[in-house]
Amino acid sequence: MPISKTKTIVIGIDPGTKRIGFGVIEIISKRIEFVDAGLLKPKTEGFTEPARELCLLIKKYRPSILCIEKVYFSKNVRSAISVSEIKGALTLEAEKQNLKIVEISPTEAKSALTGYGQADKTSVRKMVFRLLGEQRDLKSKDAIDALAIAIAGEMKNRTEELIRS
């Protein structure tokens, strides 16, 4: 009997007001492959344009899971509210496209990738490159963060599925 190879496409999103990082990975059995990463750069204020750009990504890659970073409130509450509004629009678009949505906190992503929830961004980025191979064209920190969110979110999703079964 042949071994079943499951294939899952995952999009990770690092929401922001000026730049929205995205990372696309493919899971084949237990192997993680880099597909694409970059930035969505809304030219106008509001939610329509980022949601439309996400829709195009979804149509292009046909993911089954969207992993998105949980917004945490820091010193700038106004910025956190704006990012939350963008995140809501992106999440709604993913819902319309029937994607499973996995929210992941920065601490969960750091812990999943490095084993330490307070790891610095450099350590997280090193693990992303170690898992996906060095992507020499990839310079955007937001895109690398989105790849980390995709990887950690997929791990979280797989763990939750194991617990449920």
Image (cartoon, helix red, strand yellow):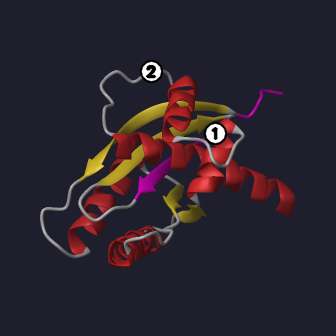
Q: Is residue 32 above or below residue 93?
A: above
Q: Label 2: how many residues lie within 10 Å, few (<14), some (14-19) or many (20+)?
A: few
Question: Residue at coordinates 57% horizontally, 64% vertically from top-left?
Answer: 103
In 3D space, how far apart are the residues under numbered discs 1 and 2 (Cα atoms)?
Answer: 16 Å
Q: Is residue 16 above or below residue 123?
A: below
Task: Identify residue for label 1.
Answer: 113
Instruction: Kindly indicate the quadrant of the structure image that contains residue 17.
Output: bottom left
- The residue type indicated by label 1 comes to Leu
Confirm whether the magenta stretch covers residue 158: no
Task: Identify residue for label 2.
Answer: 134
Q: Nearer the viewer, residue 149 or 29?
A: 149
Span colored in magenta? 1-14
Q: Secondary structure at mark 1?
A: helix
Where residue 118 sits in the image (x, y, percent)? Answer: 63, 48
Q: Residue furthest left?
A: 43
Where residue 156 sits in the image (x, y, percent)? Answer: 69, 53
Where residue 89 sits in the image (x, y, percent)? Answer: 36, 75
Where residue 37 sits in the image (x, y, percent)? Answer: 36, 40
Q: Earlier in the sequence, mark 1 or mark 2?
A: 1
- The residue type indicated by label 2 comes to Glu
